[in-house]
Image: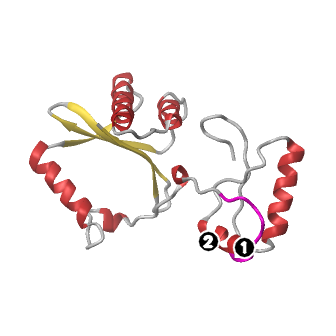
Amino acid sequence: FIDYITGDPFLSFIGNNELHQTIDTLLKYADDMQISTSLRLIPEDVLKNILHEKIEFTITEDRDSFDYILSAEQMNGFKGNKLRGKRNLVNRCKRMYDPNFELLNINNPQIRKELLGVTKDWMEGRMEKGETPNAKEFAAISKLLHSEKIPNIIAVGVYIRGRLEAFVIGEDLKNGYAMLHFEKAR
């Protein structure tokens, strides 16, 4: 893979066969190619098998790389008891702010500026709470917005009183799936 922020290559793998040999082979290859000898984006079920087999490697969890698979049917209206908290937040937002939802044209320079403004405000809000926002994420959003090729990217904005307050940027994967890349709110 290529890191979307730095452009540096890195290695990953999936599968649970011959784990020790696979890891050794990849690390030797990385060393020979003079690239990072840290394997990244290893699926959780693979890691469980690495731990189960007691293979001696340092494993570090990266919360910034977690993936979540959600059903669009379930997410539509946040159905079910598990999503009750989200449903309550949406209903409270609707009552308090009367938001408008709009598809955004990310090729429009004004829209790009608004999206980056929301992202900057989100980062500042995190810093005010004593958290450290991921500066790489701002760079990734900026890079996406200024990319010449943006296939299948869809952006939706939440406007309150005519001001963009939140957005989601996703990708239509064309096979019944979509991938959300970014969600930010002031």
Residue under the image location 67 percent in, 53 percent down: 40
Residue 127 position by quadrant: top left
The spot of residue 120 in percent (x, y) is 38, 29
Quarter of the rendering occupied by the C terminus: top left
Give the secondary structure at mark 1: loop
Percent x, y of residue 131: 41, 41
Q: Residue furthest bottom?
A: 52
Q: Are marks 1 and 2 in contact (CB under 8 Å)?
A: yes
Q: Quadrant of residue 75?
A: bottom left
Which amino acid type is shown beneath numbered disc 1? Asn
Asked if residue 93 is among those painted magenta in the image, a careful observer would answer no
Circle 1 residue: 16
Name the N-terminal-most of marks 1 and 2. Answer: 1
Q: Residue at x 55, y 52 (%)?
A: 65
Between 111 and 6, the residue placed more toward the observer is 6
Using the rendered image of the protein, determine whether residue 77 is visible from the camera's viewpoint: no
- Up-down: is 108 above or below 51? above
Answer above or below: position of 82 versus 136. Answer: below
| Image quadrant assignment for residue 36 | top right
Work out whether residue 113 or residue 119 is closer to the camera in this orientation and state it.
119
Q: Is residue 49 above or below residue 164?
A: below
**As drawn, is 55 to the left or to the right of 120?**
right
Q: Residue 103: x, y in percent?
A: 30, 41
Within 10 angstroms of label 1, few (less than 14), some, or many (20 or more) residues?
Answer: some
**Residue located farthest toward the front when viewing the structure as drawn:** 130
Magenta residues span 52-59
The answer to whether residue 58 is magenta is yes
Main secondary structure of the magenta stretch? loop
